[in-house]
């Protein structure tokens, strides 16, 4: 059970990392400049971890379990079985925290198949606050929630995404995983200012940051994690770093995997974007 003070604990220093995928295991093992990892929790079994994760853990590399199916944004409480799995992943990996998405994923037993945005209403905030508290109580380490990419917004929203997250943080002490690629997606698709969001988010509760690439198709930006991060996404990382020092920044790449050199170059671009904020300051 997570103690109340653990909920308020500041983020540990993670550095620059990459999302661990089975297809990238050897690449990551031999790649310099990787400080921490994130692994999709639903893709591993805590009692039988991939050998690569054992190897990387013996090197002292932190590994964060990243859930994609908990669904704290739904009307129903989070599944005890899913929470137990996240907790077991954290314990097996010796993780400093667990991350998930602030998303709606199912209702009435029907899976949406996507990480959908939650209705940003006061009633939704009340329900999600209780769901987050239940999740925190079931986890042995702090929880961080990620903002999601969207191609639509709910018509009855009463709060911006940043306001919603800020109030959720105030009520629960939950940490934030800010995905700057998702902020860019929402700016591109919905006209929501990413810099305004950065100005309004409680970045002092930042756990770490996601960076990823995508592509535009028929006027819609698709956050695919299959391409190099575009410059506007890295510019947003620089903007974020000008406002706060993120404990960690992580590259996501989920398919159409490039060469080791290309991945190393992406990590170098992330470091350059982070240092640009320090140099301008």
Image: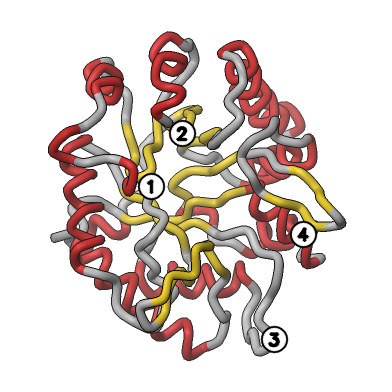
Q: Please report whichever mark, 1 or 3, sits nearer to the chain's N-terminal start.
A: 1
Residue 127 as seen in the image, left or right of residue 268: left
Q: Nearer the viewer, residue 155 or 238?
A: 155
Task: Give the CA separation, mark 2 to mark 3.
Answer: 34 Å
Q: Is residue 265 above or below residue 169?
A: above
Residue at point 41% right, 80% down?
A: 107
State the residue position of label 4: 187
Residues tagged 2 and 1 counted as in contact (Cβ below 8 A) = yes
- As drawn, the label of residue 66 is 1
Picture quarter with the C terminus: top right
Label 1, residues with CA under 10 Å away: few <14, some 14-19, many ≥20 = many
The picture quadrant where one finds residue 128 is: bottom left
Q: Please report whichever mark, 4 or 1, sits nearer to the chain's N-terminal start.
A: 1
Residue 270 image position (x, y, % from top left) = 63, 28
Task: Give the CA separation, mark 4 to mark 1.
Answer: 24 Å
- As drawn, the label of residue 155 is 3
Picture quarter with the N terminus: bottom left
């Amino acid at each position: 059970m997570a103690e109340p003070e653990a909920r308020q604990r500041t983020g540990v220093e993670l550095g620059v990392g990459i999302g661990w995928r089975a297809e990238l295991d050897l690449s990551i093992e031999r790649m310099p400049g990787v400080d921490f990892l994130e692994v999709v929790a639903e893709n591993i079994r805590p009692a039988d971890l991939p050998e690569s994760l054992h190897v990387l853990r013996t090197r002292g590399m932190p590994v964060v379990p990243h859930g994609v199916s908990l669904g704290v944004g739904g009307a129903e409480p989070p599944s005890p079985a899913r929470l137990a799995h996240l907790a077991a992943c954290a314990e097996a990996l010796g993780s400093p925290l667990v991350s998930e998405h602030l998303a709606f994923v199912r209702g009435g037993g029907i899976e949406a198949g996507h990480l959908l945005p939650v209705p940003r209403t006061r009633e939704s905030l009340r329900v999600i606050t209780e769901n987050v508290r239940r999740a925190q109580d079931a986890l042995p380490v702090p929880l961080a929630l990620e903002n999601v990419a969207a191609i639509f917004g709910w018509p009855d929203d009463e709060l911006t995404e940043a306001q919603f997250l800020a109030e959720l943080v105030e009520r629960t002490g939950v940490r934030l995983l800010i995905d700057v690629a998702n902020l860019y997606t929402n700016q591109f698709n919905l006209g929501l200012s990413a810099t305004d969001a950065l100005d309004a988010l409680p970045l002092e509760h930042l756990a770490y940051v996601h960076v990823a690439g995508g592509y535009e198709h028929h006027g819609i930006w698709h956050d695919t994690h299959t391409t190099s991060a575009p410059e506007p996404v890295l510019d947003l990382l620089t903007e974020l770093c000008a406002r706060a020092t993120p404990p960690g920044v992580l590259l996501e790449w989920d398919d159409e995997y490039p060469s080791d050199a290309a991945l190393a170059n992406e990590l170098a671009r992330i470091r350059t974007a982070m240092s640009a904020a320090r140099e301008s300051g």
